[in-house]
Structure formats: structure tokens, C-alpha cells
């Protein structure tokens, strides 16, 4: 495809729209605008045209502006709470210091198009210009109500810095990386962190490239409010009914919710089970030393636990570690007096246990020493002694609602 061919044939440049659905309303809340070009016998994406470094920015700008115009004119047919996502790389946005593009948007505002419906999907990964100026421009756009989304976030960590700097309204997460199981595990954890970060800065998560049911489930489970992808609806020239997927999404959510509730119920029951068991052991062994207590736990939970120790309420370890290694259970006295109060949730859990007088089963996490996924059951023996029992991966594997 020749750039000049497109430039001399702008009539055949036109926008496609891919709907974005929301979890809370299960209906269309926005469309992403994608550039298309009609050749004699085909409709092709303008993506490669915009990504081509050989094509001068002014050509790209001309084609882009036309797309924006055509898209926004058509958007007058929509309900006025449906947003329009426009893809902007930094070069395109900085063209003419961002003025011509803003003037175009303001012309639409005069015609009654509220600019708070505009979301700029920005990408600045390969931008060689001044990033400060770029950020400045974005802040200026925001004063008009225009929203900012960071596009195509994948498992790479460099996004974190930009998210911190820009505090975007929306984080658009690319689920393509989820396809290969090799990166899947790692991506899971990155996403969990992203969802925490999004919550802290008040950004909304949008998952794109959803192509299969499990990706939708993943998006739902990881705090995704907005969804987009071929599994839901492909990009097309025309808008669709906003409740087009309502029924199907409701059904899907119903399945996801049932599955998740079953899992949570499993965790709850396991917590109850451990609580009763450990309570009984601790009651029976009130007067004995730590090592004898550990032996009593091992007797009852040999295939379940692989490490145990006791801390005070400030997280200082009062006992040695009792650890089930290759040669059976051993005492590791080097752990005496270590402090664990710096661990996430440690003090919250102490306060919770102390007030509710109940044990807590932790979330699934990777044990630093063994590298295995484990959970920890912690139990308040009294005001100043808290028993920690690490549950083996093998046990969790056999009770897969705990994984
Ligand atoms: Ca995009």
C-alpha cells in the first residue's frame, strides 16, 4: 500500500468502531475508532500506515484528522453518554504543538459534542521528543474535560513509571500476553499489582484483545470494569445496540461469580477446619514448651504443614523454625528473634486475630525459600503468642479450591 495512493484517495479513508462494554451495566459505554481504507476489492487497516516511520508526520496527520472528523460526525448518532476512544501516539499528538487537533475537537464542541466524551489512547513508548512537553500538553487537554488512557499495557514493567507520572483516567491492558502460558503466571502478578495501583490512583481498568472466554473471566477477576475484543464484538463500520451483549454478559458473569464463590467458600471452610484443629492442639498443650507443641501439631498435620513458628504481637519470632526438610523435621534456631512486622498485612492480621480470636488463612503466595506457592495459617494462642503454620503446596494441590 502506497501512502500517496491513500492521500490522493481520501474519500476511501473511513473509521471503524469497536465497542467497549462495561461490567457494571453490561452494555456499550464507548467505541474505539480505528482507521480503515477501502481498496478496489478489500478493506484494510490503516494501522501500518500510521506506524510507518518512512511516512512524514504531516501526511499521517492529514489522514488522522479526517478520520477523527468522520468518526465524530457519526458519533452524533450515539447516546450522549457514550465515549469515543481516539488512538494518539506522541508524535501525532505533538504535531503543531497539539493545536490543530485541539481546534478540531473544539469545533465539535461548538456543535454540541461534549469533550468529556473524548478519551485519548496514548502511546509514547518510542517517542524521541521531550516527554515533559508531551505530558504538559496532555494536562492542558485535560482542562477541557478530555480523558487520558494509557494504551496497550502488557507485562513489561516500564509502564509503572508512566502511570505514576500521568495518573491516567484509564489503563488499557492488552490481554494478548495472556495467550502463552509461559508468560501467563508472571503476567498474573503484574496485573494484580496494576489493579492495586489503578485503585490507588483512581484509574479504571480496560482489558483489550479479549478473544476467549477465559480472558474475559480473567479481566473480570482482575478488577476490569471495561472490556473490548473480538470475543465480544469486532470493529465494524456501524454502531450496535448498546444492550446487544447484555444477556450474554449477564450469563457469563453468573458463571464467573458461581465459580469464584465456590472457591471462596472452599477457603472459608478450610480456615474453619484449620481453626478447630489447631485450637484443639493448642488447648491440649497449654503447659508444654514450643518444641513439644510443634511435635503435637506435626502429629496431627504432618502432610499439611511444612514449617511453623511463633511470633509475638510485634512480629518478633519467639521460637525457632520447625521445618520439614529432606531429612524430616528439624529445628532452625537461626530464626529466633527475627522480626516479620514489615511483611504485608502482618500487623493487620495480628489485630484481626487478637480481636476476633480466630485463625486466618493467608492468600496464595510464593514462599521465598522453597519457591513454591503456599498459604499460611496463623492462629492467636493468646495476647502475646501467635502460631504460624505454612501449608504445603502438595496439600493445596490436593485441595484445589485453595489454589
Ligand atoms: Ca488502541
Image (cartoon, rainbow, N blue to C red):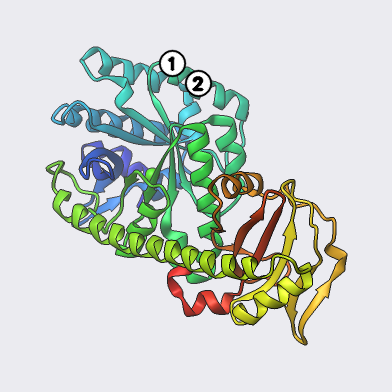
State the image quarter where residue 27 is shown: top left
Q: Name the one closer to the observer, 51 or 367.
A: 367
Q: In the rendered view, does 355 fall on the left or right side of 176?
A: right
Tell me if residue 32 can be seen. Answer: yes
Q: Residue at x 59, y 68 (%)?
A: 278
Q: Residues within 10 Å of mark 2 (few under 14, many from 20)?
A: some
Task: Assess disc 1: are there few (<14), some (14-19) or many (≥20) residues with their C-alpha within 10 Å of its C-alpha.
Answer: few
Q: Marks 1 and 2: CB-CB under 8 Å?
A: yes
Q: Nearer the viewer, residue 22 or 161?
A: 22
**Residue 261 x %, y %:** 34, 59
Vertical side of 242 occupied by 138: above or below: above
- Distance between the alpha carbons at the discs numbered 1 and 2: 7 Å
Q: Any mark on residue 143, and which?
A: 1
Residue linked to disc 2: 139
Task: Between residue 220 and residue 93, name the one nearer to us.
Answer: 220
Residue 290, x across and y down, in percent: 77, 67
Q: Is 311 displayed left or right of 344 in the figure?
A: right
Amino acid at each position: 500500500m502506497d501512502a500517496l495512493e491513500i492521500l490522493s484517495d481520501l474519500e476511501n479513508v473511513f473509521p471503524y468502531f469497536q465497542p467497549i462494554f462495561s461490567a457494571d451495566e453490561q452494555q456499550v459505554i464507548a467505541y474505539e475508532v480505528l482507521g480503515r481504507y477501502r481498496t478496489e476489492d478489500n478493506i484494510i487497516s490503516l494501522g501500518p500506515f500510521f506506524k510507518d516511520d518512512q511516512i512524514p508526520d504531516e501526511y499521517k496527520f492529514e489522514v488522522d484528522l479526517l478520520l477523527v472528523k468522520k468518526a465524530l460526525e457519526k458519533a452524533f448518532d450515539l447516546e450522549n453518554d457514550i465515549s469515543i476512544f481516539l488512538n494518539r501516539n506522541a508524535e501525532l499528538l505533538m504535531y503543531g504543538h497539539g493545536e490543530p487537533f485541539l481546534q478540531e475537537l473544539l469545533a465539535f464542541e461548538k456543535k454540541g459534542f461534549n469533550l468529556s466524551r473524548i478519551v485519548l489512547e496514548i502511546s509514547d513508548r518510542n517517542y524521541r521528543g521531550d516527554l515533559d512537553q508531551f505530558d504538559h500538553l496532555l494536562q492542558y487537554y485535560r482542562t477541557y474535560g478530555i480523558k487520558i488512557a494509557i494504551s496497550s499495557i502488557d507485562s513489561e514493567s516500564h509502564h509503572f513509571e508512566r502511570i505514576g507520572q500521568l495518573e491516567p483516567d484509564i489503563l488499557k491492558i492488552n490481554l494478548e500476553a495472556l495467550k502463552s502460558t509461559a508468560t501467563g503466571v508472571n503476567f498474573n502478578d503484574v496485573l494484580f499489582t496494576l489493579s492495586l495501583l489503578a485503585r490507588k490512583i483512581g484509574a479504571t481498568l480496560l482489558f483489550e484483545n479479549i478473544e476467549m472466554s477465559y480472558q474475559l473471566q480473567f479481566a473480570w477477576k482482575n478488577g476490569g470494569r471495561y472490556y473490548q475484543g473480538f470475543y465480544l464484538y469486532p470493529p465494524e463500520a456501524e454502531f450496535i445496540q448498546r444492550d446487544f451483549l447484555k444477556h450474554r454478559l449477564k450469563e457469563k458473569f453468573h458463571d464467573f461469580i458461581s465459580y469464584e464463590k465456590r472457591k471462596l467458600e472452599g477457603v472459608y471452610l478450610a480456615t474453619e477446619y484449620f481453626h478447630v484443629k489447631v485450637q484443639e492442639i493448642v488447648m491440649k498443650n497449654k503447659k508444654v514448651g514450643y518444641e513439644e507443641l510443634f511435635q503435637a501439631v506435626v502429629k496431627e498435620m504432618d502432610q499439611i504443614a511444612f514449617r511453623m513458628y511463633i511470633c509475638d504481637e510485634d512480629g518478633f519470632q519467639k521460637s525457632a523454625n520447625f521445618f520439614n526438610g529432606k531429612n524430616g523435621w528439624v529445628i532452625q534456631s537461626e530464626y529466633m528473634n527475627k522480626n516479620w512486622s514489615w511483611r504485608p498485612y502482618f500487623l493487620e492480621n495480628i489485630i484481626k486475630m487478637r480481636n476476633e480470636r480466630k485463625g486466618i488463612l493467608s492468600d496464595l503466595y510464593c514462599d521465598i525459600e522453597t519457591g513454591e506457592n503456599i498459604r499460611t495459617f496463623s492462629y492467636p494462642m493468646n495476647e502475646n503468642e501467635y502460631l504460624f503454620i505454612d501449608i504445603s503446596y502438595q496439600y493445596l494441590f490436593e485441595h484445589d479450591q485453595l489454589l
